[in-house]
Image: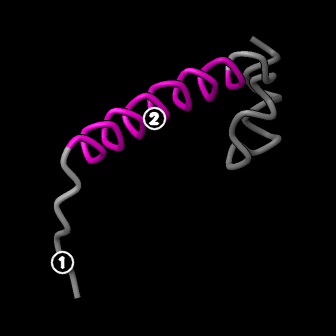
Amino acid sequence: MEFYVPLGCRGFLFRLGTFVIGIVGGAVYRKAAQRRSPEAGDPAVSLALLDLLAAE
């Protein structure tokens, strides 16, 4: 069951804060993804495919 409680100014600050947290979290995720090696990036990639890519 959903309901709405008017928060006034606090509601605006809450929305702004969650937006900023989302932006910062995305930036941290991208930075961490750049630091990982390509082999560790995608666990679905098979070892045979990695061997083929390394041979080229």
- Quarter of the rendering containing residue 25: top right
Q: Main secondary structure of the magenta part?
A: helix
* Quadrant holding the N terminus: bottom left
Residue at 16 percent across and 70 percent down: it is: 4
Highlighted range, magenta: 9-33
Q: Give the vertical position of 9 relative to 3 (above or below).
A: above
How many residues crowd mark 2 within 10 Å: few (<14), some (14–19), many (20+)?
Answer: few
How many residues crowd mark 1 within 10 Å: few (<14), some (14–19), many (20+)?
Answer: few
* Quadrant holding the C terminus: top right
Q: Looking at the picture, tell me which residue is in the foreground, 45 or 38.
A: 38
Residue 22: mark? 2
Say if the magenta span includes residue 23: yes
Residues tagged 1 and 2 counted as in contact (Cβ below 8 A): no
- Element type where label 1 sits in the image: loop
Q: Looking at the picture, tell me which residue is in the foreground, 30 or 17.
A: 17
Left or right: where 46 falls relative to 4: right
Q: Looking at the picture, tell me which residue is in the foreground, 13 or 37.
A: 13
Hey, what amino acid is under mark 1? Phe
Q: Give the vertical position of 5 relative to 8 (above or below).
A: below
* Residue 41 percent location from the top left of the image: 72, 33
* Residue 20 percent location from the top left of the image: 43, 28
* Residue 9 percent location from the top left of the image: 23, 41
Q: Looking at the picture, tell me which residue is in the foreground, 1 or 32.
A: 1
- Element type where label 2 sits in the image: helix
Say if the magenta span includes residue 21: yes
Find disc 1 in the rendering and name its residue: 3
Structural distance between the alpha carbons of marks 1 and 2: 24 Å
Residue at 20 percent across and 68 percent down: it is: 5
> Which scheme is used to colour this image of the protein?
one colour
Q: Earlier in the sequence, mark 1 or mark 2?
A: 1
